[in-house]
Amino acid sequence: MASTSSSTPAPVEVDERGRKRKRAAGADPAAPAQPSKWRTRREHEIYSSKLLEAIRLVRAGPPSAAAAGTAAAPPRSRAVRAAADRALAVAARGRTHWSRAILASRRRRLQAAHRARLRAPASPPARHGAPSASAAKGAATPPLERKAKVLGRLVPGCRKLSFPTLLAETTDYIAALQMQVRAMTALAEALSAVSATSSSGAGSSSPP
């Protein structure tokens, strides 16, 4: 009489198969969450170096601005913010819509400024008192769609994305901004410490 034990799977084999299926489906609740790329030390160091170089360029100023006779430069705080955003987009390596939009918007601003210097200023657009058809259409838009449009305007380059892609871009953009704040705070503290040290050294070396 043949034994039936060989056709019945052992409990250990059943458990192993179940664990493999869970790992393949990503349903293991005990697995640790992967950290965001913007939270790694490597990304922080890359962005900090690019930020420092961008701020040095802002402090040096464009070499051809005075020779070309252009209009007054924007405030230093705005220039530093733009440089920090460009460094953040460069650190993202163009892998996201928002980083590509930041880099493309700078090119468009430079091209628009060049065209404005070549032609006379255009007359301001006429204002219409009657409400536009787009405003009437926006009143009938569902609340979730209106919020998605607002979110798309806040995140660079995300006005015409699908909702899942918009959420992914927003999550990455927020994590990048958090890393930007940490890097700028550390840089400001380092510069303050260097300034305090140089001031104390100059005070102690001055004659009484």
Image (cartoon, rainbow, N blue to C red):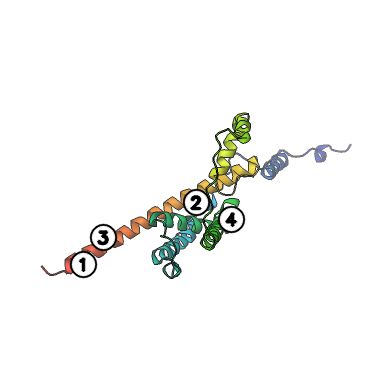
Residue 145: percent from the left, percent from the top? 62, 34
Q: Is residue 93 above or below residue 150?
A: below
Disc on the earlier residue, 3 or 2: 2
Between 119 and 41, the one lying in front of the other is 119
Find disc 2 in the rendering and name its residue. Answer: 39
Q: Amino acid at mark 3?
A: Ala
Dot 4 alpha-carbon crowd within 10 angstroms: few under 14, some 14 to 19, many 20 or more: some
Left or right: 3 with respect to 71?
right
Residue 128: percent from the left, percent from the top? 56, 37
Tag in front: 2 or 1? 1
Tag in front: 3 or 2? 3
Disc on the earlier residue, 1 or 3: 3
Q: Is residue 74 above or below residue 13?
A: below
Find disc 1 in the rendering and name its residue. Answer: 202
The answer to whether one can see residue 32 in this image is no
Residue 161: percent from the left, percent from the top? 64, 44
Tag in front: 4 or 3? 4
Between 197 and 147, the one lying in front of the other is 147
Q: CA distance from mark 4 to mark 1?
A: 46 Å
